[in-house]
């Protein structure tokens, strides 16, 4: 169920008599009003991505004056319209949907284009389909009763169980990483051997169409199979999964994101996609894989596989004993809060397995993923990362025939850099390369955004997604074949340790350096650009390769296949970084400080930083992956400059795709310029409420007509005289109860009245149904039972967080995000409920900056 309500949700005003609320306007009128309003917004602010329609305020000041905002934020009567959801503040006045940030008439640009619902910018919407996770404990009577029974032994057992779980997360994540790496290595070896055999043979007898056909067919079939798994099996397995995990850790529930089925298709799909020759990496999906492992292990169950470690068998059976032992580990972690902490540790273990960077994994989870953190979480996350790196080291050492030679820290091995030295006068060069990386990253993100919008509008059918993936694989192979065939860059054998060298048009004892970049794993190509000596590649070779790889990677990211972004970004940056080094070396042949490998590393860092906009964690990951801490300052300078330059134009690619998903993500800080917005303007009103003791039939009717996930519990009170313009209260606040709790009570028939004795329930009753609670359609009660009553007093949260109606939005935001709330009740000065604030109510206020101009928007929520 969602945090929202249906349009048929009745107005529950217990103890209130008065006029019935007016009917909402027809859907067409609301849509037309919304389009009319959005046209006004576009005219006032200018289209974000269209420089031809930008505003004239070149000073970067707020585009609508503060006085205008203050004027439009003054309180006005709110009609009692049955709300579509708890996230939209639909203030319908005379049939028009009013936007609080409508610019003044003199600010309107008459030449701005009109828009329709179909042409709305995809990033400036929120989806009504997402529900929130609840990271706040429900301190009801059952919870307090269980807490009173706990002692030191119980606390020690729970703490020990956490360490056991994070150890298992690290081991299993590493084993999955090893499986992916070994599978790709074996299949790629078969592919390259077959193509090389026919390539060398046909160069002599003139049948080049044969290796070309084999190469194209292999890549198209492997990528097609991977895309079928995603498009027809589990769409959420597409991409790297990092945006989805970031949303989960922020408190948004993404459907199927941490299911075992998603993990299975992710692992198989990424192996086939990499072997299929797409410009992707296998490192990004490892972060998603680690998160899925953590979510599954910490819960001790898999609903997809119908597996639950719970002592339900006969006490004498072996299975009972095993399940009883395991249930002691997993029993107390079946909550959103506990799962969130383990998922953060799993994401860090995935980074550690991918890059051999345990510290970088912890920082990545902290900087890019987790929205909630504590000291104990830091230690457990670092432990999981270290276990993951160590396990992967051991397994890969046996695979490569050197047991216990722990030189395989991660899936991506940059190779050992010699001690890299640099002088102070080189720092401006690194800063300039950071500028280049920021500009290229911003262009990459903008281009990928346009491609992604096109995909969402025109390539949404599953068969078309598979066909597009196969088309991209085919074109990638054609580009690689043509570049290998056309660009002649011959080098002596032994100069580059490529496993499958292609001679092409080179003389005997030589190989094509262009072919070496394409005819090996992308990770190996990165190592070649980092470590091959000066002269291995001509300037034309790395320029053409980097240019082609840039656009192919931009087209590839977002396909319906599991794919990572790290390797394409690093490889593209390494190409142009090495090109910069070659050009400087040609211009200053006697300069001893010029090292093409060193500049390739800076280019790779700048390119990746310009795309994903990470700084601290990425710098540590690169330092750990290269094994050279002395070069940390130049890497950090390049990353920071690339981020600053890129942020001037747009956001990081992960954030762009989160907005394309229309997820109500809450940023770290509240939007600026919102202190004049009050709770009564942010909240959803009226709220659907429940009395402390409510008739069963009334509760079932409410749940069937409303999709709220939380209900304020009220006590009827005598009507209080309201001033003109004040929002009428709905009853004294006594608590909050979740929809899932009510359904569990209905399923277990915890009814009172007419001699009915309510059955005993405890916290374990609710944990056993987590996270897939029954639907209201699964509840069956008789006509007699509908006349009985539900007593909410023992099950509701009697001390919910609440704010007064005049509380400012920044205070609400900090309280809501800092505590991980799902619902925040708004009360008046008499402690009467007047509304509810949810995630969407806050997320629809968005502050953006673009090319020095800033704006505060109130974006629509769509179904």
Image: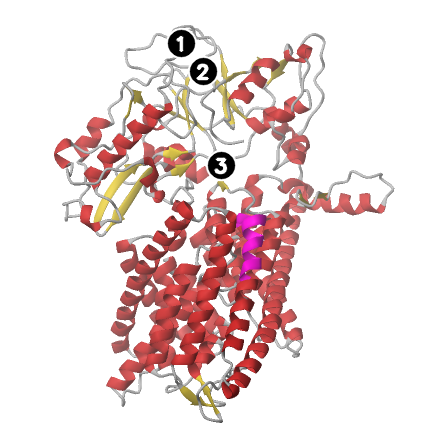
Residue 243 lies, in percent from the top left, at 45, 50
Q: Is residue 839 magenta?
A: no
- Examine the rendered structure and indicate whether residue 369 appears above or below residue 816: below
Identify the residue shown where x is 37% and y is 37%: 843
- Examine the rendered structure and indicate whether residue 381 appears above or below residue 761: below
Horizontal side of 91 relative to 371 (left or right) equals left
The mark that comes first in sequence, 2 or 3, is: 2
Q: Which residue is most to the bottom?
A: 508
Task: Give the distance between the C-alpha atoms of the residues marked 1 and 2, in whole angstroms.
Answer: 9 Å
Quadrant of the frame with the C terminus: top left
Residue 763 lies, in percent from the top left, at 65, 31
Task: Give the distance between the C-alpha atoms of the residues marked 3 and 1, in whole angstroms.
Answer: 31 Å
Horizontal side of 586 relative to 397 (left or right) equals left
Identify the residue shown where x is 48% and y is 64%: 473
Residue 375 lies, in percent from the top left, at 50, 51
Residue on which disc 2 sits: 11
Q: Which stretch is magenta?
A: 223-236
Disc assigned to residue 20: 1
């Amino acid at each position: 169920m969602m945090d929202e309500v249906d349009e048929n949700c009745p107005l529950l005003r217990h103890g209130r008599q008065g006029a019935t609320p007016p009917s909402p306007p027809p859907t067409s009128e609301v849509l037309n009003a919304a389009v009319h309003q959005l046209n006004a917004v576009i005219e006032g602010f200018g289209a974000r991505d269209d420089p031809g329609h930008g505003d004239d305020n070149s000073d970067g000041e707020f585009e609508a004056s503060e006085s205008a905002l203050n004027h439009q934020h003054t309180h006005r009567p709110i009609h009692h319209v049955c709300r579509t959801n708890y996230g939209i503040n639909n203030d319908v006045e005379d049939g028009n949907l009013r936007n609080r940030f409508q610019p003044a008439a003199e600010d309107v640009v008459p030449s701005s284009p009109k828009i329709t619902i179909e042409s709305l910018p995809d990033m400036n919407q929120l989806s009504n389909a997402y529900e929130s996770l609840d990271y706040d404990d429900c301190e009801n009577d059952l919870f307090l009763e269980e807490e009173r029974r706990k002692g030191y032994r119980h606390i020690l057992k729970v703490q020990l169980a956490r360490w056991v779980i994070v150890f298992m997360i690290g081991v299993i994540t590493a084993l999955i990483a090893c499986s992916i790496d070994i599978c790709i290595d074996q299949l790629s070896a078969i592919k390259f051997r077959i193509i090389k055999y026919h390539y060398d043979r046909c160069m002599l007898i003139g049948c080049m169409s044969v290796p070309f056909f084999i190469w194209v067919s292999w890549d198209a079939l492997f990528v097609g199979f991977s895309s079928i798994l995603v498009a027809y099996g589990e769409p959420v397995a597409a991409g790297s999964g990092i945006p989805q995990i970031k949303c989960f850790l922020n408190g948004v529930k993404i459907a199927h994101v941490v299911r075992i089925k998603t993990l299975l298709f992710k692992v198989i799909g990424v192996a086939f996609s990499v072997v299929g020759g797409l410009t992707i990496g296998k490192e990004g999906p490892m972060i998603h894989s680690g998160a899925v492992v953590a979510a599954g292990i910490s819960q001790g169950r898999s609903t997809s596989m119908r597996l639950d470690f719970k002592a339900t068998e006969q006490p004498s059976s072996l299975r009972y004993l095993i399940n009883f032992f395991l249930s002691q580990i997993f029993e107390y972690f079946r909550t959103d809060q506990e799962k969130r902490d383990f998922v953060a540790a799993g994401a860090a273990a995935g980074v550690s397995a991918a890059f051999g960077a345990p510290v970088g994994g912890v920082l990545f989870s902290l900087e890019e993923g987790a929205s909630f953190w504590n000291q104990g979480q830091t230690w457990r996350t670092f432990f999981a990362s270290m276990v993951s790196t160590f396990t992967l080291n051991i397994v890969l050492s046996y695979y490569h025939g050197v047991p216990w030679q722990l030189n395989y820290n991660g899936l991506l091995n940059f190779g050992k850099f010699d001690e890299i030295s640099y002088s102070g006068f080189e720092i401006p060069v690194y800063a300039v390369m950071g500028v280049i990386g920021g500009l290229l990253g911003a262009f990459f993100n903008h281009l990928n955004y346009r491609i992604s919008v096109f995909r969402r509008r025109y390539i949404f059918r599953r068969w078309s997604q598979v066909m597009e993936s196969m088309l991209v694989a085919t074109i990638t192979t054609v580009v690689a074949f043509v570049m290998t065939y056309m660009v002649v860059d011959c080098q002596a054998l032994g100069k580059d340790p490529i496993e499958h060298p292609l001679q092409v048009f080179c003389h005997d004892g030589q190989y094509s350096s262009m072919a070496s970049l394409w005819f090996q794993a992308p990770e190996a190509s990165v190592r070649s650009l980092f470590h091959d000596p000066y002269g291995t590649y001509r300037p034309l070779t790395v320029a053409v390769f980097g240019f082609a790889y840039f656009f192919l990677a931009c087209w590839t990211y977002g396909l319906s296949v599991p794919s990572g972004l790290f390797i394409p970004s690093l490889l593209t940056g390494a190409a142009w970084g090495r090109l910069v080094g070659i050009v400087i070396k040609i211009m200053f042949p006697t300069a001893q400080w010029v090292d093409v490998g060193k500049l390739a590393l800076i280019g790779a860092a700048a390119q990746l930083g310009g795309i994903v906009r990470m700084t601290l964690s990425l710098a540590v990951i690169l330092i750990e992956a290269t094994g050279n801490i002395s070069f940390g300052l130049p890497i950090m300078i390049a990353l920071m400059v690339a981020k600053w330059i890129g942020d001037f134009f747009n956001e990081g690619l992960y954030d762009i795709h989160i907005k394309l998903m229309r997820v109500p993500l809450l940023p770290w800080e509240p939007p600026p310029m919102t202190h004049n917005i009050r709770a009564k303007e942010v909240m959803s009103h009226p709220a659907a409420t429940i009395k402390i003791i409510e008739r069963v039939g009334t509760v079932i009717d409410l749940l069937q007509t409303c999709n709220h996930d939380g209900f304020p519990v009220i006590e009827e009170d005598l009507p209080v005289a309201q001033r003109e313009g004040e929002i009428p209260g709905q009853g004294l606040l006594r608590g909050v109860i979740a929809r899932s709790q009510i359904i569990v009570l209905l399923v277990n028939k915890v009814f009172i009245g007419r001699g009915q004795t309510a059955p005993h329930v405890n916290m374990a009753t609710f944990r056993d149904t987590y996270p897939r609670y029954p639907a209201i359609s699964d509840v069956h009660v008789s006509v007699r039972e509908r006349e009985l009553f539900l007593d909410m007093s023992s099950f509701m949260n009697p001390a919910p967080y609440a704010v007064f109606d005049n509380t400012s939005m920044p205070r609400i935001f900090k309280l809501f995000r800092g505590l991980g709330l799902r619902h925040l009740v708004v009360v008046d000065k008499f402690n009467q409920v007047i509304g509810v604030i949810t995630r969407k109510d806050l997320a629809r206020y968005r502050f953006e900056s673009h090319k020095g101009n800033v704006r505060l928007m109130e974006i629509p929520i769509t179904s």
